[in-house]
Image: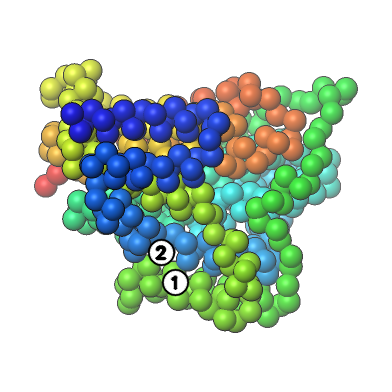
Amino acid sequence: MMAIFTLVVLAIAGVLFLFERIPPAIVSLSIPVVLVVAGILTPEEALSPLSRPITVMFAGMFVIGAGLFRSGLASVIGQFVVSLLGKRCSSLVASVMMAGGILSALLSNTGTTAVLIPVVRGVGITAGLGHRRLLLPLAYGATLGGLLTLIGTPMNLVVQAALIDQELEPFGFFEFGLLGVPLLAVGTLYMVLVGRFMIRELHPCEPVPCDENSTSRHPLEKPDSRRGKWVSGLVLLGTVAMMVGGWVPISIAALAGALLIVILGCLRLDEAIRSMEWTAIFLFSGMLALSDAMAKTGADRLMVNAFLGVLGPTPHPIVVLGAVAFAAWFVTQFMPNTASAAIMAPVGLAIGNTLGMNPHALMMAVVVGATCALSTPIGTPPNTLVYGISGYRFTDYLRVGIPLSALLLATAILLITQIWPSHAT
């Protein structure tokens, strides 16, 4: 009975995420309350995700990223990368995607997109291209760049937390890049050779939205002194070095970096607090509580049995990985990608336990599916940002994004089977 109730909570949360009549953070924070009232989780179990090390790291990296945006260093890096390849359309598409991908590897892809939108618009006008050919590649590059490192996107941290909760070996800091680098390359090649020609040209009488406020709400960039750029850059490099070197736990490295950003004057304390993506943090924590409840009540087993009822008792590993990735991709078209990853992660682990498959392969399938939700303006935050100021229509995303998503998913599944052997050893 408790398992069924937990699945009902999951279904209701999914519907509320889909229609967004209630803010996602409120939905997510309501989940542990409901689970405690229902007697499924204790108060300590329900609130434990807020204090987990990976949540602390999540918050710390928001502050460090805000320091780079506030100092203007993020914009300088973006302009430098965009200027590398000249003013031809094909070269600009490639350089814009590279700029978005590189910055998103270490910073918020939402913030990266917001900072680079005015840069890309200016470059497009200077090159005589306008901005429509470049803003969608920017959004796609920023999204795919999240797959380059552990901290590139909250989804990576979601599956990392799922592995840690099951006492499994976590992913390495750059391990995501084994998949992310080739996918960014494939995505860039597609946009240069095919995708840019599929972007609808604006009709001469059709207005172009010009709300600059929508591009700068997150973050509000106020370029600071040369000292601020050096300090924020060195803090980021030092934090990443500590994480990669394993000298201290990654949560402590992120916390130390965030403290240095404030102590050394890159951000005021109130700016640091505002820079944290509280919606993402609350969403992350609430869905982790639901994941705990699914494991505790056996709800995840019910979902696995239903999954295997469709695929059969002994499906081929590639079929399983493809089905998990497709499910994550489909769900992410209609709800926040962090939420869809949090929903799919425990299901993927349970499938792995049942079939004896490598859990790391299944977690990568979840992340890839949620990342490749490039076919709607609500699939990823960067997609939403450029939708508001570009004059794109929903059909533009479908026309460009569906073939790209299919190409990326197929490439990813083949890579996953080679990098993380499908059967657990």
Q: Residues within 10 Å of mark 2 (few under 14, many from 20)?
A: some
Q: Nearer the viewer, residue 329 or 82?
A: 329
Residue 407, placed above or below residue 158:
above
Q: In terms of secondary structure, where does tag 1 sit?
A: helix
* Residue 192 on image: x %, y %: 61, 36
* Residue 35 on image: x %, y %: 30, 41
- Image point (70%, 58%), residue name: 220
Earlier sequence position, callout 2 versus callout 1: 2
Q: Nearer the viewer, residue 213 or 386?
A: 213
Asked whether the beta carbons under mark 2 and mark 1 sit within 8 Å of each other, the answer is yes
Residue 331, placed above or below residue 83:
above
Residue assigned mark 1:
255
Give the side of residue 283 with respect to residue 422, left or right.
right
* Residue 214 on image: x %, y %: 72, 44
Residue 197, placed above or below residue 124:
above
Q: In terms of secondary structure, where does tag 2 sit?
A: helix
- Image point (71%, 47%), residue name: 215
* Residue 388 on image: x %, y %: 70, 36
| Mark drawn on residue 56 | 2
- Image point (32%, 36%), residue name: 344
Please state which amino acid type lies under the numbered disc 2.
Val
Please state which amino acid type lies under the numbered disc 1.
Leu
Q: Is residue 285 visible?
A: yes
